[in-house]
Amino acid sequence: MTDQNNDSIEDFSAINRLEEEFIRREEEVSRDLKSRNRIRNARGAVKKAIETLLILVGLGLFAVLIAFAIRLVIYQPLG
């Protein structure tokens, strides 16, 4: 019985290669998902920046119109 155990050679190289292939594929999928998420986040950030810019421009325009209205009330046109 001990002779039989000593004669058998266990080669796990195929299993190790398969495991390495699975790990490599998982890393590629993870890298791809991270890239897609970065693109999605960048698009969201650009959209939010544009919205903020429009709000600030609108508030600035409103402030200029209010200042102009106050000037017209205080310094009435001479005409």
Image (cartoon, rainbow, N blue to C red):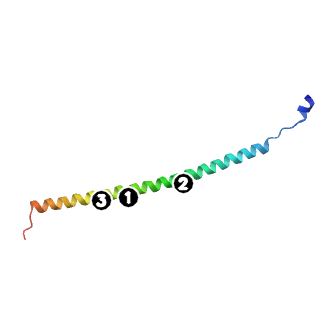
Instruction: Of the two numbered discs 3 and 2 on the same chain, state the one appearing first in sequence.
Output: 2
Q: Secondary structure at mark 2?
A: helix
Q: Identify the residue at horizontal 25%, vertical 60% (top origin).
A: 61
| Residue nearest the viewer, comparing 1 with 64 | 1
Q: Identify the residue at horizontal 88%, vertical 32% (top origin).
A: 5
Q: Secondary structure at mark 1?
A: helix
Give amino acid for label 2: Arg
Give amino acid for label 3: Val
Q: How far across and how far down the image is residue 1, in percent?
A: 92, 29
Give amino acid for label 1: Ile
The image's mark for residue 50 is: 1
Q: Secondary structure at mark 3?
A: helix
Is residue 39 shown left or right of residue 9?
A: left
Q: CA distance from mark 2 to mark 1?
A: 21 Å
- Density class for disc 3 (Cα within 10 Å; few <14, some 14-19, many ≥20) is few
Hey, which residue is sitting farthest bottom in the picture?
Answer: 79
- The residue that mark 3 highlights is 57
Is residue 14 shown left or right of residue 8?
A: left
Q: CA distance from mark 3 to mark 1?
A: 10 Å
Q: Identify the residue at horizontal 67%, vertical 48% (top origin).
A: 24
72 over 25 or under it: above or below: below
